[in-house]
Amino acid sequence: MAMITVDTQFGLLGLEEQDGAIVRVVWDGSDDAPDSPLLQEAAAQMRAYEAGRLQRFDLPLRVAGSAFQQAVCAQMSAIPFGETRTYGEIASALGQSAQSVGGACGGNPIPIIIPCHRVMGAGGRLTGFSGAGGVETKVALLRHEGAAGLLI
């Protein structure tokens, strides 16, 4: 696996590639050049997102985990830029419990690109975030996107 790092307002992000797909985003990742064309593109898209020029990532992704984890990640990926959904809404779409969706959101291996920060608790309640900085980083991402007006 290869990784490139991108210094953003949300932290130093490591974008990891394996076999032609992005498989992980981590905070405080280490750059282990040489970078592949895919990693260079992923870094360029992350910079464009941070600068407000990109609203939807277009990268090959591979989500490790169960079919349920993959289904939750697909639901999160479908949430448009600047919008949010609740755990309950995703749970209803998948016929599962909100708690199980919350666990899968917390296990999202590709945060920001798969926008788990766009998932809120019941009634739009702010909930946790697995990335560095926790809820503060989630708030920063939502503000960046102009989402969840109650936070802005």
Image (spheres, rainbow, N blue to C red):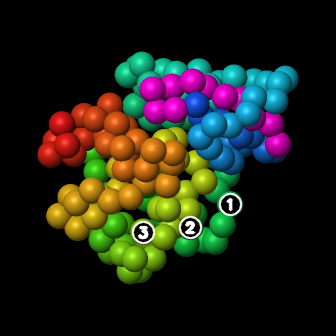
At x 61%, y 26%, the residue is 6
The residue wearing badge 2 is: 69
How crowded pointer 1 is (Cα within 10 Å; few <14, some 14-19, many 20+) is rated as some
Residue beneath label 1, please? 64
Q: Residues within 10 Å of mark 3 (few under 14, many from 20)?
A: many
Residue 101 in the image: x percent, y percent? 43, 71
Q: Residue at x 34, y 37 (%)?
A: 140
Q: In the picture, which quadrant includes the C terminus? A: top left
Q: Considering only order in the chain, which callout, 2 or 3, is on the residue closer to the N terminus? A: 2
Instruction: Tell me which numbered mark, 2 or 1, is placed earlier along the sequence.
Output: 1
Q: Quadrant of residue 54?
A: top left
- Amino acid type for the residue under numbered disc 2: Gln
Indicate the position of residue 89 as horizontal and vertical percent values.
Answer: 29, 67
Label the magenta part by its dominant secondary structure: strand
Magenta stretch bounds:
1-11
Q: Residue at x 40, y 77 (%)?
A: 99
Callout 1, which amino acid?
Answer: Ala
- Is residue 2 in the magenta section? yes
- Tell me residue 126's x, y (percent): 27, 56
Q: Mark 3 = which residue?
A: 102
Q: Is residue 107 above or below residue 26?
A: below
The amino acid marked with disc number 3 is: Gly
Q: Secondary structure at mark 1?
A: loop
Q: Are marks 2 and 1 in contact (CB under 8 Å)?
A: yes
Q: CA distance from mark 3 to mark 1?
A: 17 Å
User: Image quadrant of residue 29?
Assistant: top right
How crowded pointer 2 is (Cα within 10 Å; few <14, some 14-19, many 20+) is rated as many
- Residue 29 placement, left or right of 98: right
Instruction: Answer whether residue 3 is magenta in the image.
Output: yes
Q: In the orientation shown, which residue stands out farthest toward the left? A: 150
